[in-house]
Image: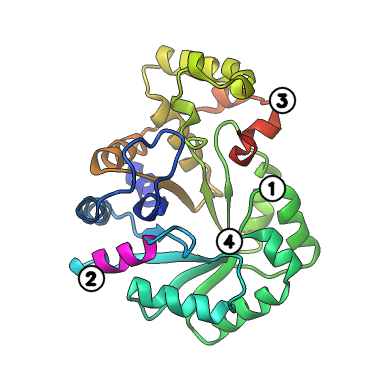
Amino acid sequence: MAMNYVNKLVLGTVQFGLNYGINNSSGQVPEDEVYRILSLAKEHNIHTLDTSSAYGNSEEVLGKTIGRGDFDFKIVSKYPQGKDPVSSVFSRSLKALRQSHLYAYLVHHFDFYRSNPDVWEQMMTLKANGSVDKIGFSIYTTDQLQYLLDRNVLFDIIQFPYNIFDRQFDPYLSELKRRGVEIHTRSVFLQGLFFRDVERLTPQLQPLGKYLQCMDRYCREHAISKEMCALSFVLQNPYIDGVLIGVDNVRQLQQNIQAAQCMADFKELAGQLIIKEKELLNPSNWK
C-alpha cells in the first residue's frame, strides 16, 4: 500500500537547470548528481519527470542524463510565454530532451494563454498528430480553473499548487476526476516555508507563524517529521495522481521516498489549519 504513494511522486527538475527555491543554498544540481537522482527514482518506481523550456537548461541536462542510463520516464514539459509558435518550442524541447514523443505538454503561463487563445489550438494539433499523449495547463488559482471550465476547454491534465495550508482547489477535485482529468500538484512544502524557523520569518510572512507552530506541535506530539506530514497529507488524497517534489541531491530524494511511506492520518491537523491570510499562500506575493 505504501509503495503506491511513492509511485505518485513526480520528480520536478527546475533545480537541474536553475538555482531555485527559498531554502536552496547549494545552487544548480551538478549533472552527476542528476544521474544519481534519476537512478534512485527509477529504482523506486517514480516514473514521471516534470520540466519546462523555461527552466534554464533543465531539458538539456535531462536529455544528456537520460542518454547515459537505461531510463524510461514519462516526461511532462511546458510551453512558456513567447513569440515562437507552440510547434517550434515543442520541437526544441524534444531535441533537448532527446525524445521523439512526450507524455504531456502544458501551457506554462495562463495569462499569456488568455491573451493568445490560439495557443490552445496549437496544443491540440500536437496531440492530434501523436506528438504528445496529454495536453493541459499549469495554473495558480481557482479563478483560472473556473475560466477553463466555463469555456468547456477539454484538457487532459492540470497542475496547480496544493498543500496542507493551501487547499483552495478542494471543491474542484471530484469534478476534475469526473471529467477524466489527470491531477498533478506542486508546492507540497510551500516552497520550503514549512521548514523555516518561525523566528526567522520575514515581517510579511510572520502572520503564517502561528500555523507553522501548530504544525510543529502536531509533528512533535506524533513523533513524525514535518516533511512526512506535508508530503503524506497530499499523497493520500485519492483525487491527486501526481505530487511534484524538487530535490537538490540524492539524500533529499531518499528522505522524500521514506516520508511518502507514512500511513498516518492528518485530517485532525488539517482541520486546525484554516489559513485566513490566503494571499500569503502564493509565493509570487512574497517579497
Q: Amino acid at mark 3?
A: Lys
State the image quarter where residue 181 is shown. Answer: bottom right
Comes first in the chain, label 2 or label 3: 2
| Mark sitting on residue 67 | 2
Q: Earlier in the sequence, mark 1 or mark 3?
A: 1
Instruction: Find residue 277 and name its label.
Output: none
- Disc nearest the viewer among 2 and 3: 2
Cα–Cα span, label 3 and label 4: 28 Å
Q: Nearer the viewer, residue 97 or 174?
A: 97
Q: Which residues are magenta?
A: 58-65
Q: Which mark is residue 141?
A: 1
Distance from the alpha carbon under mark 4 to that under mark 1: 13 Å
Q: Secondary structure at mark 2?
A: helix
Q: What residue would you read off at disc 3? A: 276
The kind of residue on which mark 1 rests is Thr
**Would you call the spot at circle 1 few (<14 residues within 10 Å), some (14-19), or many (20 or more)?**
some
Q: Which element type, helix, strand or loop, lies under badge 3?
A: loop
Give the residue at x 66% y 42%: 170
Residue 93 location (% of width, % of height) = 43, 73
Whether residue 12 is in magenta: the answer is no
Query: Where does residue 72 sit, x and y in percent of width and height?
Result: 29, 68
Q: Which residue is mark 4?
A: 108
